[in-house]
Image (spheres, rainbow, N blue to C red):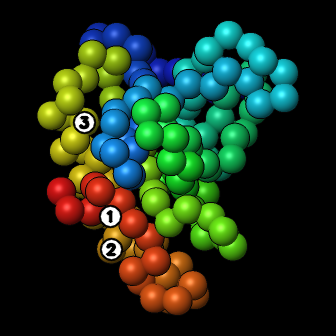
Amino acid sequence: MAEIQTNREGRRVLYVGCGNCRATIPLVCTGQFMPHIPLPIAASQAGVSCGFCGLLAPVFTCGYCWTSQALYVPGTNAAPTPGFGASRYVAPAVDAPGNAIQAELSDRFANVMEEFAGGVANSLGESFGGSGFFESTWFSG
C-alpha cells in the first residue's frame, strides 16, 4: 500500500499541471474499476499508485479543459510513450507540501519539463518521428 509522507508543513501532495491549459490540480484517485472515496496518489519507482487501486496508468485528464495527456513524474521508471491516436500533451507532476503556493508549483513544473525535454522526450522522440513529438505549455516556461 502506498504511503503518503508528512512533514512539519503538513501532508505531501502530488500536484499535476495540465499541459494544455496550465491548471494546477492535486492528483487523487476515485477508483478505477470499483469507485471509492477520493484518495491522494503517491509517486513510486514504478509510477503513480493509489492505496486502494494499486499502480495506475500514467495518464491524466484535466478537470478543466478535459484534455487527456501523458503524466510525467520525475524519478519514476514509467516514461510517457506515445501511441496511435494518443494526445501529444504531457502533464508534469511534482511532490509538494499541501500548502504550496501557485508560483512555487509553476516553477517546479517548468523545471520538471526542462528535465523531460532534455532527456526523455529526445530519446523517445527519435523513435517516434522527431524530438518535437511531445507538446506542453510548460515547455515555454
Residue 101 lies left or right of residue 72; in this view the side is: left
The residue lying furthest to the front in this view is 65
Query: Do callouts 3 and 1 mark residues in contact (Cβ within 8 Å)?
Result: no
- First along the sequence among labels 2 and 3: 3
Image coords of residue 107 (percent x, y): 19, 45
Residue 84 lies left or right of residue 113; in this view the side is: right
Q: Which image quarter is the N terminus in?
A: top right
Element type at marker 1? helix
The amino acid type of the residue labelled 3 equals: Leu
User: Which mark identifies residue 105?
Assistant: 3
The residue drawn where x is 51% and y is 41% is 66
Dot 1 surroundings within 10 Å: few (below 14), some, or many (20 or more)? few
- First along the sequence among labels 3 and 1: 3
Q: Which residue is mark 1?
A: 115
Query: Do callouts 2 and 1 mark residues in contact (Cβ within 8 Å)?
Result: yes
Image coords of residue 8 (percent x, y): 29, 10
Q: Nearer the viewer, residue 127 or 68?
A: 68
The residue drawn where x is 38% and y is 51% is 20
The amino acid type of the residue labelled 1 equals: Glu
The amino acid type of the residue labelled 2 equals: Gly
Q: Quadrant of residue 113?
A: bottom left
